[in-house]
Amino acid sequence: MEWSKIASKKIPLSLIAIVLVILAILGLLYIDFLVQDEIINDAEYTIAEEDVQAHWDEYKAVTVNVDKLRQALDSGNLSLRLLDEDVNIIIFESDKADGYYRGYANGVAANEAEFYCGEDTCHCYVDLGTHSYHIVLTGELVGNEIIYVLYMTDYEKEKQRHEQYPIDPLTFEISNEDSLEHNISIEIFDPSNSLIFSENYSISPGEIIASPDISEVLGTHRYVVTLDGDYSFERSATVARAAELGSSEKLYFNFINNSESPMEVAVAMA
């Protein structure tokens, strides 16, 4: 009887201890979420109307303190103010050497969050089920500040846009009007600056090479082109929706008989 009395007294004490530990952990997490600030800041920059993409349902220009973002990611959890929404993120996978972090948002495992942090630039993606946020480079500088665009895509609106105006995939074409065979290397980076295509081609005089469909990610894609293993240059093309007044841009690379300028590059609507 005495043992049962002792046990009956210990059980609620144990439960209380467990509850206190859980509350302490949650409290620490909550405090840690609150202290993350000054990572994303409004920028004194106006995004040109012609640069606004159809899938940017809400957007604004921002700057990102990459060092503070990296520190917050390294801590394992952070809170970001994305437009008018506070988003809490838990990181469960990271490769610090490559600057890659993966986690989930607002306590829902399906709400994927991905971050890439370079030396002084970053890219962020957060999926919240009904909408997503992206932070991508604009390629612009104001003073010493790198300008990003923070935009939100509403999935229901995007579905309606897709039904009305399907996406024209990114493609390109290579031709050779020279009398010599040439080599060309093409790398393509998507709007988040991730390498999505890399290929080397040998092209004979009179030959035309058409690429496969490469990307249906809306936005500007960057091409890095190397001719005959020697001369390199960059171009860009935008993936857009098929519409009456326009669609995706398609790049045409044409070798010509000119030693000083061996290639012509043209862009046209796909």
Image (cartoon, rainbow, N blue to C red):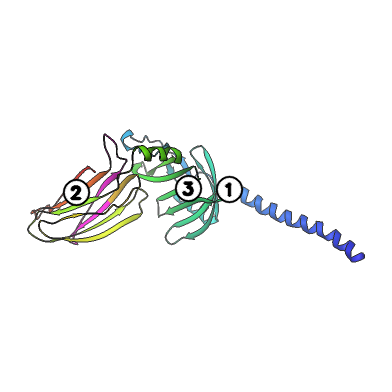
Q: At numbered mark 3, what does the secondary structure look like: helix, strand or loop?
A: strand
Instruction: Name the residue: 30% across, 40% down.
Output: 242
The residue carrying mark 2 is 252
Q: CA distance from mark 2 to mark 1?
A: 49 Å
Hey, what amino acid is under mark 1?
Answer: Phe
Q: Residue 199 lies in what quarter of the image?
A: bottom left
Q: At numbered mark 1, what does the secondary structure look like: helix, strand or loop?
A: helix
Tell which circle, 2 or 1, labels the residue nearer the N-terminal end: 1
Q: CA distance from mark 2 to mark 3?
A: 35 Å
Q: Number of numbered discs present?
A: 3
Residue at the right extreme, as displayed = 1
Can residue 202 be found in the magenta stretch? no
Q: At numbered mark 2, what does the secondary structure look like: helix, strand or loop?
A: strand
Place of residue 233 in the rendered image (x, y in percent of width and height, measured from the top left)? 22, 53
Looking at the image, can residue 61 be seen?
Answer: no
The residue carrying mark 3 is 126
Hey, what amino acid is under mark 2?
Answer: Tyr
The one of 159 and 24 positioned closer to us in this rendering: 159
Looking at the image, can residue 237 be seen?
Answer: yes
Magenta stretch in the rendered image: 223-247
The local crowd at label 3, few if under 14, some if 14 to 19, many if 20 or more residues have their Cα within 10 Å, is many
The residue carrying mark 1 is 33
Q: CA distance from mark 3 to mark 1?
A: 16 Å
The one of 140 and 15 positioned closer to us in this rendering: 15
Place of residue 263 in the rendered image (x, y in percent of width and height, measured from the top left)? 14, 52
Place of residue 182 in the rendered image (x, y in percent of width and height, measured from the top left)? 14, 60
Hey, what amino acid is under mark 3?
Answer: Val
